[in-house]
Amino acid sequence: MGIVRKTKSLELVLNEFRCEKTAISAIELIKRLYSKLNKTTIYRILENLEDDGVLHSFLGQEGVRWYAMCHNCSKSKHNDLHPHFECVNCGKIDCLNLEVNIPNIPNRKVSSSQILIQGKCEECYDLK
Amino acid sequence: MGIVRKTKSLELVLNEFRCEKTAISAIELIKRLYSKLNKTTIYRILENLEDDGVLHSFLGQEGVRWYAMCHNCSKSKHNDLHPHFECVNCGKIDCLNLEVNIPNIPNRKVSSSQILIQGKCEECYDLK
DNA sequence: ATGTTATTGCAACTTTGTTGCAATAACAAA
DNA sequence: TTTGTTATTGCAACAAAGTTGCAATAACAT
Ligand SMILES: [Zn+2]
Ligand SMILES: [Zn+2]
Ligand SMILES: [Zn+2]
Ligand SMILES: [Zn+2]
C-alpha cells in the first residue's frame, strides 16, 4: 500500500537505515527497536517502504528477510537486481554494485534472479 | 550423520525423487507422504541424504527448502554450485546445468554463491 | 477544533522446522 | 533362527519468523 503518513514509528525505522550502509534483517530491527515498536508495526512499515521503492528485500542464507536502501527505485519500478554479499565471518550482508550476467537458457524466459554470494567481507578479509 | 540403515521410510522418500526430474520442497514431500511418514522422519532423512551427497538443498523464492538429486557428489564433497530455475507460472524448480561466472570482487574473498533464477519453464514457455 | 481514517499494539494464530524421549525395527553376531 | 545392540521412528511439545483481526490511537485535511 505504501507509506501515507509521516509517523514517529516510520522515522525510527528509517533512522536505522540512515546510520547503516549495510542491509539489516527484519529480526535485527525488531531486536533494536524492541522497547519502542511492536514487531507487527515494523513488518508493516518495511512492507510499505518496499512498496514505495525506498527499501528492497531479499533472503539471507538462513532464510530470513533482509532489507536495504534502494538507490534508483520508485513506487512503480524496482531496479534492485544486484547481487548481495553475506560475510561468513561477521554475518553482515551488503549490496554489490556489479552486474552478473545470466546467460540465455533455451526454451525458457528469464524474468528475474537473486544472487547471494558468500565469503569474507572487506573488514574481515584482512583479519588473521 | 548420513544414512546407516536401509529402512522402508528411506525407500519411500527416495522413490519420490526417482519419479521426479525436478526439485521437491520439504513441504511437498510432507504432503505427499502424509499418510505414511511423520514430518520429523522426513526432515531427518532429507538431512541424512544431504550429508551423504545424495541430495542437495537450497531455498526457493518463498524461503522454504527444496531438495534435488546430486550428480557427482559424495559424503566428502558437494559440487552443487549450479543455479536453480523457479517457474513463476507452475512453481516447479529445477537444476540448471550451466555455469554462471561470479566476477572477482576487490578486497573480498568469495567462497560460494546461490543463484535462483525466475521465469517461465520449458513447459510453461509455450502456453499462451 | 473536529472528523476521518491510516497507523499502532496486542493477542492469537500460522507455517516451517527442531528437540527429547520412549517404542520399534534393522541387522550383525551367535 | 534367535538374540542383543542401537539406529530409526512417531509423537508431542517447542521454537523462530512472520501474519491477521480488531479495538484504541494518532495524523492530518478541513
Ligand atoms: Zn565480515
Ligand atoms: Zn541490495
Ligand atoms: Zn512452469
Ligand atoms: Zn540443483
Image (cartoon, coloured by chain):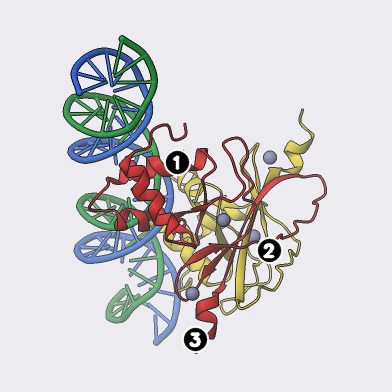
Chain colours: A yellow, B red, C green, D blue
Earlier residue among tags 1 and 3: 1
Residue A82 circle label? 2
- Name the residue carrying label 1: B47
At x 54%, y 81%, the residue is: B125
Secondary element at tag 2: loop
| Quadrant of the picture in which ligand 1 is shown | top right
Q: CA distance from mark 2 to mark 1?
A: 31 Å
Q: CA distance from mark 3 to mark 2?
A: 30 Å
Are the residues under badges 2 and 1 in a single subunit?
Answer: no
Whole-percent x and y of residue B52? 52, 38
User: On the rendered structure, is A112 left or right of A122?
Assistant: left
Mark 2 or mark 1, which is nearer to you? 1
Name the residue type under label 2: His
Chain for disc number 1: B
Are the residues under badges 1 and 3 in a single subunit?
Answer: yes
Residue B127 circle label? 3
- Mark 3 nearby-residue class (10 Å; few <14, some 14–19, many ≥20): few
Whole-percent x and y of residue B48? 45, 38
Secondary element at tag 1: helix
Whole-percent x and y of residue A62? 51, 46
Chain for disc number 3: B
